[in-house]
Amino acid sequence: MHTVFSMKELGTVSYFLGISVQALSRGYFLSQAKYATELLHKAGLIDCKPCSTPLAVKASSPPSSSDDLPFSNPSLYRSIVGGLQYLTITRPDLALAVNQACQHMHLPTNADFQDIKRLLRYSAMKQSTVSQSSTETEYRALANATAELTWLQQLLADMHIPSSCITELR
């Protein structure tokens, strides 16, 4: 590769594209703690009280009239949600909540931003469980992708699109 590309040997990687890389005897430990802290700073939630779940199980209070109003800074919403998408590399447990947040990117409301703040408060919580291996993380990602593909296949069937129009990946 040195003959084709101009390259430098920088030694072992420790931090790359917002991901901290720590070499262990069994492999590598990837962390985005610094990146998550930067997201908390961006949202103004660095000293927030953590919560135990990324999504509200039930509404804690009746919706107010301001909940349906458009959020005053949609670019901040989009920026934070984009950052959360990148954070799912090392935190696949956030994927469902982030996916739901992405569905409101075009016109976020105040309630949508409250949901994002709750999700960030969950990222701020010290997590008690971590994937024991990259294989477990890959399995979770594969299970998520399978669920998405199954949903997409059902959606196409509901729209009466014949399976001959779908190309297979091999």
Image (tube, rainbow, N blue to C red):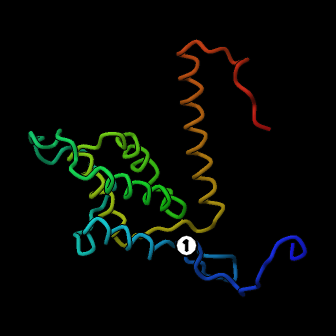
Classed neighbour count for the residue bearing mark 1: other residues with Cα under 10 Å, few (<14), some (14–19), many (≥20)? some
Answer left or right for 136 relative to 67: right
Compare residues 53 and 91 and report the one nearer the observer: 91
Compare residues 89 and 39 and report the one nearer the observer: 39
Identify the residue shown where x is 25% and y is 69%. Answer: 44
Answer left or right for 18 relative to 101: right
Question: Which secondary structure lies at badge 1?
Answer: strand
Identify the residue shown where x is 43% and y is 58%. Answer: 84
Give the residue type at disc 1.
Ile
- To which quarter of the image does residue 38 belong? bottom left
Whole-percent x and y of residue 47? 23, 75
Identify the residue shown where x is 34% and y is 41%. Answer: 104
Compare residues 4 and 122 and report the one nearer the observer: 4
Whole-percent x and y of residue 123? 37, 65
Compare residues 148 and 133 and report the one nearer the observer: 148
State the quadrant of the N terminus: bottom right
Identify the residue shown where x is 88% and y is 70%. Answer: 4
Q: Which residue is mark 1?
A: 19
